[in-house]
Amino acid sequence: NLAEAETNRRFVRSARRVVVVADHTKWGTVGLSSFATLDEVDTFVTDAGLAPGAREEIGEHLPGLVVAGESPGDTAPAG
């Protein structure tokens, strides 16, 4: 939805902090539009299905990566 993407871009521009919550299936997906670059995001919250290579790439751009179900320092899904 292009109109929604434009609204989200405006939110990002006016925000003091940007937190993106997306499950691992959204990583690497090509869409018609985007609303932020990784460099504009402060924290990315996702699930344990995110591949190690994607975690490394996100870590190169963001100060915060939160993986639901994992404790800080975990390398594998909890449970």
Image: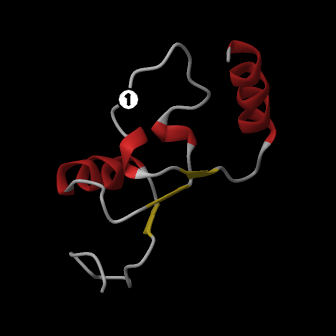
Give the number of callouts: 1
Residue 47, above or below 73: above
Residue 55 horizontal/vertical position (percent): 28, 55
Q: What is the basis of the colouring in this image?
A: secondary structure
Residue located 39% across and 47% down the image: 61
In the image, 18: left or right of 52? right
The answer to which image quadrant residue 34 occupies is: top right
Residue 44 horizontal/vertical position (percent): 50, 55
Q: Which residue is mark 1?
A: 29
Residue located 57% across and 39% down the image: 40
In the image, 38: left or right of 9? left
Query: In which quadrant will I find the N terminus?
Result: top right
Residue 2, above or below 36: above
Residue 52 horizontal/vertical position (percent): 19, 57
Residue 76, above or below 9: below
Residue located 29% across and 82% down the image: 73
Query: In which quadrant will I find the C terminus?
Result: bottom left
Between 6 and 60, which is closer to the camera in this rendering? 6
Residue 25, above or below 31: below
Amino acid type, residue under disc 1 in the picture? Thr
| Tag 1 secondary structure | loop
Between 13 and 49, which is closer to the camera in this rendering? 49
Residue located 74% across and 33% down the image: 13
- Residue extending furthest front? 79
Residue 30 horizontal/vertical position (percent): 40, 21
The answer to which image quadrant residue 48 occupies is: bottom left
Between 57 and 52, which is closer to the camera in this rendering? 52
Crowdedness near tag 1: few (<14), some (14–19) or many (≥20) residues, C-alpha within 10 Å: few
In the image, 73: left or right of 2? left
